[in-house]
Image (spheres, rainbow, N blue to C red):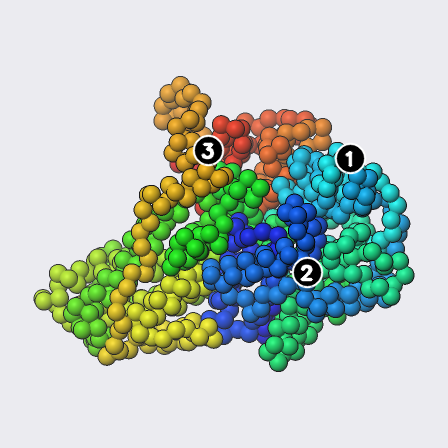
Amino acid sequence: MKKRYLVTAALPYANGPLHIGHLAGAYLPADIYVRYLRLMGREVVFVCGSDEHGAAITVKARKEGTTPQAVVDQYHTVLKDTFEKIGIDFDIYHRTSAPIHHETSQDFFRKLLQKGAFLEETTEQYFDEVAGQFLADRYIVGTCPVCANPEAYGDQCEKCGSALSPTDLIDPKSMLSGSVPVKRPTKHWFLRLDQHEAWLREWINTGVADGKQLHNPADWKNHVLGQCNSWLDQGLQPRAMTRDLDWGVDVPQEIPGAEGKKLYVWLDAPIGYISATRQWALDNGKDWETYWKNDDTALVHFIGKDNIVFHCLIFPAILKAHGDYILPVNVPANQFLNLEGRKLSTSKNWAVWVHEYCAEFKGQEDALRYNMVKKMPEQADSEFTWKGFQETNNNELVNNLANFVNRVLVLSHKYYAGIVPAINPDLDFKSGWETDKTGSYDQELSLLYGKLREMGTEIERFNFREALRIVMEISGAGNALLQFNEPWKTVKDTPETVKVVLNLALQYVAVLSVAIRPFLPFSANRLRKMLNLGLLRDKGDLLAILNELVEGNPIVLPNHALGQSEHLFSRIPDEVIEAQIAKLGGGAPATASAAEKTTYEPMKDTIQYDDFAKMDIRTGKILTAEKMEKSKKLLKLSVDLGFETRTILSGIAEHFSPEEVVGQQVLVLANLAPRPMMGVESQGMILMAENEEGKLSFVSPATGWPNGFGVK
């Protein structure tokens, strides 16, 4: 275990507000991880900040007829305020326009130049003759050469996640004037990524660099490794680290030819993690270098899948070229969150804006956090729906968690005047973990200990959805404990047993008040107040509870005075949800109305059960994927079925890139007769769902489901 952790969350562009895709992609998982580390007494620094440079900012300013500085000043404030309201607890939220960031970035450039990391070249770059200026990457749009997305940017395709150069685009055009740009010569400094390819490949796939084991690749997500290897397999090429811009960090002006040149945003932005740490250290009397240059520090980057290449290849190459910095031990990138069956779109207002949610759902911030964890796109794209949000809030938070807490506290006040009862722990009762099972007080505490350990293990593996499921198991078992023992019926006949049941139920609630902290921090505070236990300090509180439970000690002691019960969560009515659906797209019709207009394929002929029983459908996971030559539709997949690996050709290439599907859990029609296709034998069929627009979606088992098991 490392002595300390430095956790970063992707710097959001300060050109717009935060939407739920951002929240579920990088910021909520990072916050959960950091809160857990703090509860376990680990030393951790959590940094983020506004990315205030790059063409996206100037594009926004040009559209709005204002200045880049005015844009970043406005949205930095909006972003910082939104993070605070939704409970993302950074140690520092910095900004790349700060002088310390410019200084740090320029010093980095000087050191890289001094160490010969750059290749200085004059190349032809796109120039807008109408606007009279060279075009930065984000000033150019065109068709992605990888997935044929017609709206790819000059540095990246946001549909397939491929990192691009402007000259890669098919049919490029200028975003400034709409004209077709021409190429003109200009001088820039290129990072020699080709010189880093060998060690990056070894480090990504084995975790070894410079002879030292720096990370375990088995702990990295398959789609992260897949995207990195796809890029490595194409061969790394030198990449320009400067741009012809009038907004950004200046190339140090003492360098010949630096006039009018700015640092490339993907050199400048990740250095923002370093400058933010420097500012935090100055503010807190710490040594920032301990967190960036000491092997006892674990560096973890939380990002979305569109930033994988930059954080796993380009930034590590920059750090390694500098020579003094540690490399990340993990980059647990999430995939994309969709909204009501469509991709999130800021331009079409097809988004749920977090600052608007916080204003309209005051006091219900944790309801959104909970749903975001439930829908977190950890291994594959997922989808948020307002109806789904309502159901998880009403059925899981209200009916399960809040109901359990309320019943325990109300009964404790009713029977014992709000004082935790002293008990005889040897009395029998029915356990909440299994129907008709006799419970033991000590065994119940041991089970709570085990669940907390399971939760922690999943968080440390970045499996936040599973960790939350385990937490809710505690609440579910608590409800069952009450239901099986019915203290409201037995309090007169077996009062001493009822004391044991309610004392134990209070231990459940006390454990939950800490266990929910990483996921639902506002609710944890309210629950601690109800229990009169005091707010958590986030300095080893969970570790302290684990130490008590492993010794068989209760968390809430007899004769402790409880606080008053309050509503932990409230039901969300239909009309509130309908109003939110109507807001999408500036007044798009509600989901129900859209459904009424949906057309469906006619049902096929009726079959008998025996016909269905002939199909052997198995769970599996895609290990590798590649495009078939001379085919626009086919991907060649290797699929792990647990007992064997199959080669399957699937006609999904027009819907998914190879990088997107690696690691995807799937259902496979395993006993389909093999079929030769384009010289390759396909040994099964991947099951997919298709909507009326022809869009495909994987039909998948639950995350983490074992491979090779049957579907009935």
Residue at the limit of the structure toward the bottom, as seen here: 285
Question: In this rendering, would 685 be left or right of 120?
Answer: left
Badge 2 density bin: few <14, some 14–19, many ≥20, Cα 10 Å = many
Badge 1 density bin: few <14, some 14–19, many ≥20, Cα 10 Å = some
Q: Nearer the viewer, residue 286 or 704?
A: 286
Secondary structure at numbered mark 1: loop
In the image, is residue 558 above or below residue 693? below
Residue carrying label 3: 616
Q: Nearer the viewer, residue 532 or 72?
A: 72
Badge 3 density bin: few <14, some 14–19, many ≥20, Cα 10 Å = some
Which comes before the other along the chain, label 1 or label 3?
1
Q: Nearer the viewer, mark 2 or mark 3?
A: 2
Secondary structure at numbered mark 2: helix
Residue 264, quarter of the rendered image: bottom right
Spatial CA distance of label 1 from label 3 is: 54 Å
Task: Locate the N terminus and report the quarter of the image it occupies.
Answer: bottom right
The residue shown at (87%, 63%) is 255
Instruction: Say the numbered circle drawn on residue 270.
Output: 2
Residue 340: tell me if it is visible.
no
In the image, is residue 193 above or below residue 630? below
